[in-house]
Amino acid sequence: MPHTPTVPCALRALLAAASTACGLGALAAPAVDPAGASASPPPAASPRAETYGEFRRLFDARSYEQAMAKAQELVRLIETEGAPGSDDLQVALMNLATTQYLAGEYVGAEASYLRVIGLAEASGRPMTERLARANAGLATVYYAGHRYDIAAGRFEQAIALSRRSEGLLNEHQLPLLERYSDSLTELGRYEEALQVQKYAVRIATHKFGERDARVAPSLEKLGRWYARVGAYDLSRSTLWSAIDIVEKAEGPASPNLIGPLTALADCSRRQLLGPTRQGTLADADRPGVFHDLTVSPVYSPLSPAAEGQKALERAAAIAGERPDPSPAQIADVRAQLGDWFEARDQPERALPQYRLAWQAASHVTLGGKPLSESLFDRPVLLHYVRPESWNRYANRPRQEIELRMVRLNVTVTAEGRVRDTKVLEDSGDARRAEQTVQAATTARYRPRFANGQPVETPEVQFMQAWTVLLPKAGATAPEDKPPKP
């Protein structure tokens, strides 16, 4: 099955990754709690206060590995005070888990979040908000490790706790809903993922009204999701609705049109790269998911290729012709226009767009380094053709299946192609690994840049998920063998 990975607006993704903002909605993990959040703040000159101050300094400087050591020291100091289940310890463990996650220590972060959850539940007075944040952080750790089956359950718990403490339609759950839907989609649970996407739109329309421009980002995400699973007509209808709402509220040159326009191009790109198989799946095999009677189909006089390219060119014009043009926004749109040509096997047309993106981004600093480095410091996977049988058991009961990953190392060339494939982990079956290697050869990447020029990148990790059957009672091996190619 053709697969175009979720490649959101590059700038938004970078800002989210760099953020350590507080709240349930944090995409990375719940933020560090201030010392004042403790039940009994330590005296200003105490060892605990000094350790916290040094931890916070390192954390704010994004020196996460060093901050992690201070966070661990703070946990030990609180434990020696003889309050094993105190609020202070729970806060310190939350801070430790956040730092471990940001440092890439997923195993440690998992253990710390689980410990917070256990302490909170055993306290006899569990704090719903803290439990929600801990479950959200734990889910995000699993999500980052591609353990989507476990992540989905934790996201569900975090969302339920959020609604219990802040109401059914609270906005704090929106980033959780996005990751929850992503996890469900990766598992092939499309009907559930669609309901989660629609709930996010419901939250926005409840707050702003159906024709308010602030609803457009939620419609954009729904439109991107429809495109991701191959429901191209519904994607276009949803995205044109978002464009129409913004144009009527803010005019045809509104910067808020850039999001849905680039999403429309993404829909066209996906259809061009895999129209036959994805269209068949969407229209025939999953009618209950995709035939939404509340959305009228959009029939464009343009071909997908023309529609997508025109949408991106319009977005680039809006970004460049603003009275106060944003270099970051220009870089973002030009990078996506380069991605459009790269994914369509036109690297010679992609390169000028990537260079424009690099030039604009070099004037912007994000997280202490030029945005040009953040956009181009590693290859970005744009598209590949999934193995046909990767989710053949997705409709089986959850207790009968599990998700396994095949991991490869590949070299991405300066033209964005793949060579020198090496299997790192075959998930227990050589045939799955062989089919994943075949899929990797179809991959198209935005290449890494150095000094404004595309360069080859060795040892890039490529991963493919597989749903497999668990062993039946009394069986010696699971019935998870994919069919021979």
Image: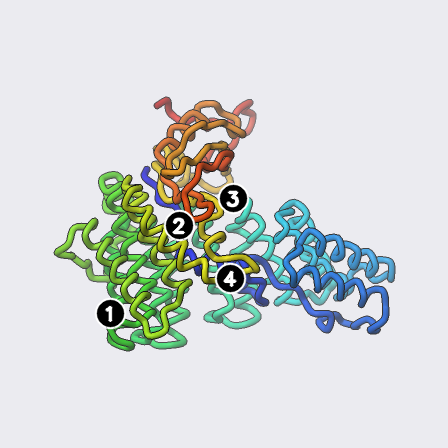
Pointer 4 and pointer 2: residues touching (CB < 8 Å)? Answer: no
Q: Secondary structure at mark 4?
A: strand
Q: Nearer the viewer, residue 164 or 414?
A: 414
* Color style of the picture: rainbow
Residue bearing the label numbered 2: 6
Q: Give the CA distance from mark 4 to mark 3.
A: 30 Å
How crowded pointer 1 is (Cα within 10 Å; few <14, some 14-19, many 20+) is rated as some
Q: Amino acid at mark 1?
A: Asp
Q: Secondary structure at mark 1?
A: helix
Q: Give the CA distance from mark 1 to mark 4.
A: 33 Å
Q: Earlier in the sequence, mark 4 or mark 2?
A: 2
How crowded pointer 3 is (Cα within 10 Å; few <14, some 14-19, many 20+) is rated as some
Residue 5 picture location, percent across and down: 39, 46
Q: Nearer the viewer, residue 270 or 382?
A: 382
Query: Left or right of 130: which side holds 340?
Result: left
Residue 128 picture location, percent across and down: 62, 66
Residue bearing the label numbered 1: 244
Which picture quadrant has residue 198?
A: bottom left
Question: Is residue 378 shown above or below 310?
Answer: above
Q: Earlier in the sequence, mark 3 or mark 2?
A: 2
Q: Give the CA distance from mark 3 to mark 2.
A: 14 Å
Q: Nearer the viewer, residue 224 or 57?
A: 57
Residue bearing the label numbered 3: 146
